Image (cartoon, grey):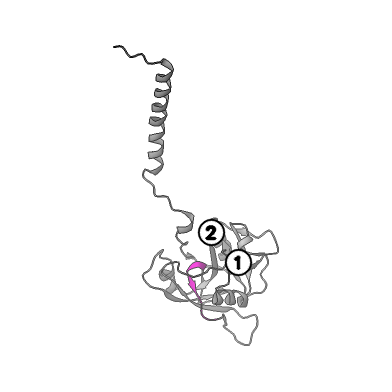
Amino acid sequence: MVVRVRSSSITVFLGVVLLTIASFPLHMARGAGKTEVMPMVKSAPTAVVIEASGNEPDLRRQLRTKNGVTELGTPRVPFSQAPTGSYGFIAPQPLGMALVTQSPDLVLERNAPGSNAYEIHKLADGSGMVVGFIEKSLIAQVTPENRPHHIRIGLCSNRSDKTPYIAAIPLIKLMVDRMPVRLEPKNPDSPVMLDMDLQGTANRKSVPGTQ
């Protein structure tokens, strides 16, 4: 007995087979040699330090260039609404309160509200970084991407002979239990210091600047 198969059926069958073969290598190529990280589980940014001497304005410019941020385009905006790749400023007391209470957002200003204001960077991926100045001995402790335990650090709002190195510290890794302290208590414009814990991993319950 001879079985007759219609040519149209054969054509359809071959088309399905060819499409399956063509799509298989493409699917495999997407997963080969690369591990995709979903946005919600991406790692926190590593602290950034400029290991160079210089005056404060020049060091700030170097750090902004390294982090790829530019000045805010609006006078005042919540961190969550600020464009990525931008920087602004916040006074020490509001920053300290937001970090101590783990408030859901920070309000940034394009112009520094005082000489001792802290600079905040919003990176291209939306991560927040607080900028300040640290001692030389802290550089090796804050820059590793992962550390087994948290460390206690002092982050000053301004450069001094004791804290000459500018650093950007990821907000998501900070645990703060006290307000900033003036280095000169009787001077309202005195540089301030934030005494805080830098965690080994990003384990804050809530992060200023995120929703």
Q: Position of residue 203 (x, y in %)?
A: 45, 69
Magenta highlight range: 169-178
Residue farthest to the bottom? 186
Q: Is residue 172 magenta?
A: yes
Residue 120's place in the image compared with 42, above or below, is: below
- In front here: 102 or 19? 19
> Dot 1 lies on which element?
helix
Q: Which mark is on residue 67?
A: 2
Q: Is residue 168 visible?
A: no
Q: 24 left or right of 91?
A: left
First reached walking from the N terminus: tag 2 or tag 1: 1
Q: In which quarter of the image is residue 69?
A: bottom right
Q: Is residue 133 visible?
A: yes
Please give the name of the residue rendered at 44% of the width and 60% of the height, measured from the top-left corner: 43
- Name the amino acid, label 2: Asn
Q: Where is residue 206 in the image (x, y as percent from the top left)?
A: 52, 69
Residue 82's place in the image compared with 157, above or below, is: above
Residue bearing mark 1: 57
Q: Is residue 159 magenta?
A: no
Please give the name of the residue rendered at 58% of the width and 62% of the height, measured from the top-left corner: 61
**How far apart are labels 2 and 1 at the CA level?**
15 Å
- Name the amino acid, label 1: Pro
